[in-house]
Image (tube, rainbow, N blue to C red):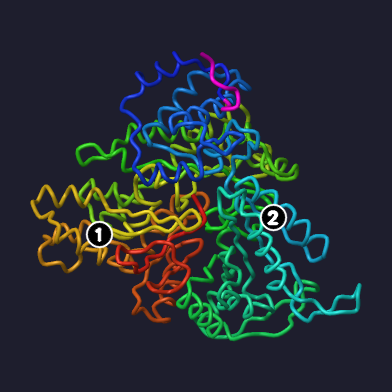
């Protein structure tokens, strides 16, 4: 029997599938939450809207489609199809959501991250709006810098009127996103960035104070090195009109930093991106102005990037990380993501042309917190920091080696000779590693998100247009049962509190091992992010969780520490503030990224 060509796996026979099942160790094991997410967002549907594939068939569809790229270079498509299928079925590696949703289907758009320029003209603004609509329809997320737009009340010579400013135009993008809803499968996602020296910066940082305003946006301030220095030492910064490059006022840098911190304390926005640091580390010519919606992928205008994450929790054997298997997954993951670039169906011609010039990919990790637990290491410990550096250093080193080998086989990315990587003999991809939040693919993999600690040991996740998924840590339940302390009373208390910190009937070593997001100090959150950033080409998505009692001064300390430790950006979230998507068992809230993954 041959599969229906509508699945994208034409020519794959039933005997092939049976052989795969026998050859791949272990059976696909998905949680009920993973099944719910797959049904809502990922599995192929027929013309009547009915589900037309199983999870196994989804992975087969993706593996078949991506492996077709191997034929362009004389490679063994069937061999790599089996490799790709195996690592996905074992939940050791998963690509970003658009790849799982669209590979082998007519839409065919496989990338998660896009950045679009917004030029200071009405045609430029609405060209960006049209491009955003096409990207959202295909399942991607978009980042914008509105820093080129002239400030509110500035002159518009063509009409004799005055400009309405960046924030007013952001509203148009937000409403359009709300209307599109990405075909109902994936919520529209945007990042808005404004330079800290733009004259409308105060209006921008307060833009989300109004309930219901810009709900489809994360917003971030592009903080320069000069601003960070002056905010600490004292002094003013000039506000520069982008229309003419002239100073149009000034603000006290310390007061401005304080206002940013106040708004983030109140509602999680804005975040901070350290724009000069991002550009200093970027290997290509051109200026980066913005990132994708969750901040982990800085991109040039019209670039896109596809992401994939290795599930570290699946690689722990008897308390030890399997470095040999990790290296194999890095090699396969880099090849997979490079193949995605070739079989991708880009929503806009200019995006295709720009992406193919740099061939950026973003291989990252998920399940870091569960890896630590399985190794008996507390997220709060110095050993966790050492492992973060060791693991990510290893991944990036091996990813670059793999990209170099692909460069020798297939040719380097076209901008190679203009890049800072030209000292290598060859390099297929301008960047190779990114730490994404893995919001939904970590649910599919049944592990913790990205490099975050466990949000809580029991919580409710609000997803999929109002659906509620209850999560309880299976690792804690197993540990509690092995100690003989798992009782209905403990389960009820866990559902109420979400953490075992301070519970008299839970041994101290378990309390330490299962420290949750709010049990981890802000300093350790930042240190973990910095440890990963030290060995990551692009950037790191990470939330610094703060207790409800945290002050604005605590937020300011996080900003300074993140900058001092070399992070490319930082996001804080104070417990109990708005815009939350994870809820403790009793309905209290815990923060999480509502966009990426």
Relative to 489, say whether 318 is above or below: above
Write down the quadrant of residue 10 in the picture: top right
Foreground pick, 42 / 134: 42
Task: Name which of mark 1 and mark 2 comes first in the sequence.
Answer: 2
Residue 108: x and y, percent? 63, 36
* Secondary structure type for disc 2: strand
Q: In this rendering, which labeled residue sits more in front, label 1 or label 2?
A: 2
Q: Position of residue 597 (x, y in %)?
A: 49, 49
Determine which residue is flagged by label 2: 116
- Residue 57 located left or right of residue 169: left
**Can residue 425 be spotted in the picture?**
no
* Vertical relation: 443 (above or below) 485: above
Residue that label 1 marks = 381
The residue sitting at 56% across, 29% down in the picture is 66
The image quadrant that residue 531 belongs to is bottom left
User: Number of callouts in the render?
Assistant: 2
Residue 410 drawn in magenta: no
Q: Name the residue furthest left.
A: 484
Q: Residue at x 66, y 54 (%)?
A: 180
At x 76%, y 76%, the residue is 164
The answer to whether residue 143 is left or right of residue 325 is right
| Highlighted magenta segment, given as a residue range | 1-8
Residue 379, image x, y percentages:
28, 57
């Amino acid at each position: 029997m041959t599969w229906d060509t509508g699945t994208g796996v034409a020519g794959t026979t039933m005997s092939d599938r049976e052989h795969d099942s026998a050859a791949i160790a272990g059976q696909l094991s998905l949680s009920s939450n993973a099944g719910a997410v797959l049904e809502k967002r990922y599995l192929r549907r027929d013309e009547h809207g009915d589900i037309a594939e199983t999870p196994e068939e989804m992975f087969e569809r993706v593996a078949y489609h991506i492996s077709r790229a191997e034929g362009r270079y004389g490679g063994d498509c069937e061999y790599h199809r089996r490799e790709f299928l195996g690592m996905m079925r074992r939940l050791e590696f998963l690509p970003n959501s658009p790849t799982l949703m669209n590979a082998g289907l007519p839409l065919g758009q496989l990338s998660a991250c896009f950045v679009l320029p917004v030029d200071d003209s009405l045609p430029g603004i609405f060209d960006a709006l049209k491009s955003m609509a096409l990207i959202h329809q295909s399942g991607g997320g978009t980042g914008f810098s509105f820093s080129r737009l002239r400030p509110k009340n500035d002159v518009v010579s063509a009409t004799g009127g005055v400009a309405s400013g960046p924030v007013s135009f952001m509203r148009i993008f937000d409403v359009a996103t709300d209307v599109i809803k990405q075909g109902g499968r994936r919520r529209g996602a945007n990042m808005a960035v404004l330079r800290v020296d733009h004259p409308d910066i105060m209006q921008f940082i307060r833009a989300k104070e109004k309930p219901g305003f810009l709900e489809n946006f994360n917003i971030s301030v592009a903080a320069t090195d000069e601003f960070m220095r002056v905010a600490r030492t004292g002094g003013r910064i000039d506000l520069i009109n982008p229309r003419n490059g002239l100073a149009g006022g000034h603000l006290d840098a310390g007061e401005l930093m304080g206002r940013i911190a106040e708004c983030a304390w109140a509602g999680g926005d804005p975040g901070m991106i350290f724009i000069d640091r991002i550009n200093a580390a970027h290997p290509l010519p051109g200026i980066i102005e913005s990132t994708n919606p969750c901040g982990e992928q800085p991109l040039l205008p019209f670039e896109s990037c596809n992401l994939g994450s290795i599930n570290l929790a699946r690689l722990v054997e008897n308390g030890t990380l399997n470095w040999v298997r990790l290296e194999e997954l890095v090699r396969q993951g880099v090849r997979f993501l490079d193949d995605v670039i070739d079989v991708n169906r880009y929503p806009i011609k200019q995006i295709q042309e720009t992406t193919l010039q740099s061939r950026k990919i973003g291989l990252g990790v998920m399940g870091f917190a569960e890896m630590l637990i399985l190794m008996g290491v507390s997220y709060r410990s110095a050993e966790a920091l050492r492992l973060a550096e060791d693991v990510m250093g290893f991944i990036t080193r091996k990813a670059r080696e793999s990209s170099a080998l692909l460069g020798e086989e297939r040719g380097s990315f076209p901008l190679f000779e203009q890049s800072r990587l030209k000292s290598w003999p060859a390099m297929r991809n301008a960047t190779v590693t990114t730490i994404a939040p893995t919001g939904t693919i970590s649910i599919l993999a049944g592990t913790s998100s990205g490099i975050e600690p466990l949000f809580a040991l029991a919580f409710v996740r609000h997803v999929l247009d109002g659906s509620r998924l209850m999560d309880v840590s299976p690792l804690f339940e197993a540990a509690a049962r092995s100690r003989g302390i798992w009782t209905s009373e403990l389960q009820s208390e866990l559902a109420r509190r979400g953490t075992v910190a301070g519970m008299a009937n839970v041994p101290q070593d378990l309390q330490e091992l299962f420290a949750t997001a709010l049990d981890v100090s802000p300093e350790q959150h930042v240190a973990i992010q910095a440890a990963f950033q030290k060995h990551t080409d692009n950037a790191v998505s990470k939330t610094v969780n703060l207790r409800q009692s945290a002050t604005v001064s605590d937020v300011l300390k996080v900003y300074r520490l993140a900058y001092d430790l070399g992070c490319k950006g930082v996001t804080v979230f104070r417990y109990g503030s708005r815009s939350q998507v994870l809820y403790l068992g009793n309905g209290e809230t815990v923060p999480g990224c509502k966009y990426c993954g």
